[in-house]
Every structure is written in structure tokens, then in C-alpha cells.
Image (cartoon, rainbow, N blue to C red):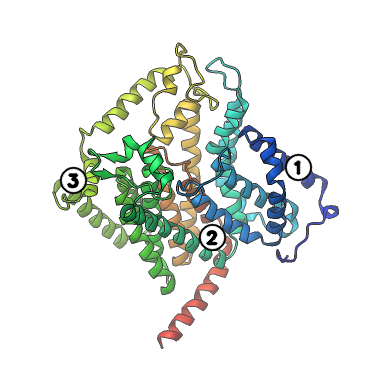
Amino acid sequence: MNSASYRPNISEMGGGRMVLLLLLFAFALLQFYTSGFGAFATICVIPAVIAAVITSFRYRMFTFWVLVVVNYLVSMKALPWPDGIPTSLYNEALEILLLAMVIMDVKGTKFDASLNIMFSALVIWCFFIILQVMNDTCNMAWDIPTWLTGARMMAFQLMYAFLVFTIYINAPNKLVSYIFLWGGLALFSVLWLLKQKILGFTALENEFMEGPGRKTHILQAGTLIRYLSIYTDAAAAGIGMACTSVAFLIFGLTMKVWKHRIPCFIIGLALIWGFFSTGTRTALACFIFGFMVYAVLSKSVKMTATIGVLGVIFVGMLAFTKIGDGNQMIRRMRSMFNKDDASAGARDANQEVMKKYMRDAPFGIGIGMKPGSMAGNHKYYVMNTIPPDSEYVYIWIHTGIVGINIFLITTLLMFLGASRIIMFKLTSSSLRGIGAGLACGFAAMQLGGYGNQVLMQFPNCFVFYGGLSLVYVLPYIEKEWIAYEEKLIDRQNGKLR
């Protein structure tokens, strides 16, 4: 069915689909309500929303590309986003709209690629998070709006990303278009960081740097600035850039078409400079870990040996030499190997305190708990005052040992399912390379989530969970991909002749 000429006909829709669609929109309205979106503001945006919905039905893929761009820019502090609207709602509104269009046009949509182990794992995780609404560990009244806000960020956005990627990226040309749109946005983040470094911060960025970000972004008496680019903070920027760099360098190593390979290498190398400029030490560990995972997925002794040797040389240079010590950022990255680092010691001390409290909270303190929601004499008050400093610690605090284990198991299942496809189901070497890049970026981001609270931040969550979901799509488009690639290679060879 041609999406440009499609007109939804209500009479053609089954009763079940209509009910599902209404429930989806009701859920969207509930999200707006719980986010404090006032009645007057809602009335004001209705005409714009109606126009956007009508346009979206005519140009479905355009709506998906808009979602990708919005996801990357929604946390950019330089843009004056309207007050009172949580940044997550821009993403969610577009995702819900894309899913609503699928429900209305179910006959023209294939769901084969969506029914897989990753979908099953996400269903388990989302179901557990829904059950968390009944968590009364803290013996406080249920706070449904706060629970919903936490559930959306912790679970529902993962399912949204999975569904829209597996449904809308269903052909080789769309896959390549996504890779280069993602690469273009990643390159823009590097250029914006360069702009911050040379020309300075905008007024809104400077407000963050002099306010909440001062302690973590302006170091060594103001001589070392950690740049955040278009991200929420420098940690999200550094880790996001490092994981994206892993993906694009692997794309560059494995793609056969030169007009695809060269831009991927350029983007990957630019991102290395970018993540060093953020001063995020975990980013370096993510970068190294991503290539260690690729050494396994490549199933190549030569590749494994090459990556191993280069990795040992690189780590040895940082850990045991003074090469590059004249550069502040390199000195900061080198401090990652310092066992007496004060920052790491503070985190370990905080986690020891947390362990004592979490023994009595196997399901966590609840997703609805937030700073300021408990009295000072409450048993778990301290749990709301200690910074988690890590996405995994945050999940552990709010969902307990049960929750963090479910999260770890479902994440491992998703990754192993994707790894199996890359290693045993794909025959095209370039398509295996794309799958490996996406999977290695995802694995590196999980390490980032272990070290910093960046896993569920924009744009990282959508990019890397959506990227892993694309690995499950690759077997369904492999035949088309081989024909598509051969055509491009023939054209490339013709130009060379």
C-alpha cells in the first residue's frame, strides 16, 4: 500500500483495532495530564496537533525521520523548548502517532520482524515495571503520576523504540538512510561541541554550566571544562559519542561501497575527538569494550588479534606512560587507571551505604519515590538523598535486587539473540558488519550505564535500543540488501573503469 495515497477508512477498521487505538490515545492523554500540561495549553495546541496528525498519515516515513531528529535535539540546552512540557513527551507523541498509524493500517504492515526474543524480553521488563505500581515498601500513598513518569523512562520508551524501528525500517534503502541520518546528527553534535569550545556557550547552556553543572563540568579551578554538546550533560555526551564511534568505525571497516565507508570512518574518527573533549572517563572504557565485543562477534582470528594488540598498546600508553600529558583531557582520561581516584572512592562508599538499606527492600523503594517525597525521619530517606551515579544503581534502588536481576537477564537475552543473528544467520559480510556495529554500540552503552546515569537519557536510549532492534530486522531484508549492494558496487566499479 502506498503511504502517500493512503486514507484511513473507519468502516474498514475492525472493532478490536478501534478499541486498541482509543486506548493508545487515552494513554497519551494520561501522559499529558500527569506531566502537568494545563487545560489552556492543551486547547491551544489542538489545531497544531490535528494538522500534524493529518500530515503524518500522508508521509509516514517523514514522521519517523522527524522522530529521529527530535530525539537527538530534544535535550539540547541551546534550543528554547517551551516551559511546562517534559522533553520526553515530544518523543512519545511521535512514537504513539507512528504506532497509531500502524494499528489503523494493520493490513499493510508486516510484523514478522517484531515477534522475536527482544520483544519477549521487553514485555517481561515492562510487565514487571507495571507491577511496581503496587510497590508499598515505603508505606506511603501511591503516586500514580510519578510512577507513570518513571515507568515511561525506565521501560515504555524501550518498547516504543523497538516497535517503531522494527516496523518502519524494513528495506535496505531505509536502513542506509537511517545510518546516515544518525551519522549526520552525531557529526552535528561534534561540531556543536567544537562551537562551544571556540565560541563559547549560549545563554541557556551557560545557565546550566554556572548552576547545576558547575561542580561536575568546571574542574581544576576553572582550567578544565567538560563540554556537553547537545546532550543533557558531559557524561551522556561522552558515552553517547564513544558508543556511536564504535558503531561507525565498524560500519566503515565492513561496508563494501566506498561512498558509504568513507563517511562512516570520518564520523567515527570525529566522535573520538568529541568524546575525549567531554572529559568523561567512562567513555574511554566504553570505546575499548565495544571493540572487544566486536573481536568476538567478527569470528575472525586476524581481527581479534589486531584489536587485541592495538588495545594493549593503547591502554598501555595511557596506564604506564606520560605520552600526551600536556593535554588536560588526556590527563583526565589517564586518571581512569588511578586506583586511588577520589570520585571512584566516593561512589563505592555510597553503594556500601545503599546495600544496608536495600537488604530490606527486595523490590526497591518504588518507582514513585523521588527526592523530597519522604520525611527526614523516614527509614529510606537517605536512599533519596544519595546520588545513584549509575543507571544500574538507579534501577537497583527503585526496583530492588529482583528488578535489577530481571533487567540484567532481559538485557542479556536481547543482546545474545542479536549476537546469534550476526554470527550464525546472516551471510552478507557487510550486513553482518552493520549488525555488529549496532550490537557493539549497544553493549558499550550498557557499560556506560553501569558507570554513569546515561542509559535512559536522550538521545542514547532511543538510538541504542532502537539500533539493537534493527539487528533482528536484518535477516528479513538480507536478500534485498545483497541485490541493493551489488547494484551500488557495479555502479562504483563502472566509475572506476
Which amino acid type is shown beneath numbered disc 3?
A: Ala
Q: Are marks 3 and 1 in contact (CB under 8 Å)?
A: no
**Mark 2 highlights which residue?**
474
Q: Residue at x 66, y 40 (%)?
A: 41
Please state which of residues 375 and 118 is positioned toward the viewer in this rendering: 375
Residue 477 in picture, x, y percent from top left: 57, 64
The quadrant of the image that shows the N terminus is bottom right
Please state which of residues 171 and 138 is positioned toward the viewer in this rendering: 138
Quarter where residue 12 is shown: bottom right
Sequence-wise, the earlier of marks 1 and 2 is 1
Residue 173 in sight from this viewpoint: yes
Which amino acid type is shown beneath numbered disc 2?
A: Leu
Which amino acid type is shown beneath numbered disc 1?
A: Leu
Residue 406 in picture, x, y percent from top left: 50, 33
Q: Residue at x 53, y 55 (%)?
A: 69
Q: Residue at x 43, y 47 (%)?
A: 231
Q: Are marks 1 and 2 in contact (CB under 8 Å)?
A: no
Secondary structure under the numbered disc 2 in the rendered image: helix
Vertical placement of 358 versus 38: above or below?
above
Q: Which mark is residue 64?
A: none
Q: Which mark is residue 319?
A: 3
Secondary structure under the numbered disc 3 in the rendered image: helix
Sequence-wise, the earlier of marks 3 and 1 is 1
Q: Residue furthest top?
A: 377
Secondary structure under the numbered disc 1 in the rendered image: helix
Point out the frontmost of discs 3 and 1. Answer: 1
**Mark 1 highlights which residue?**
22
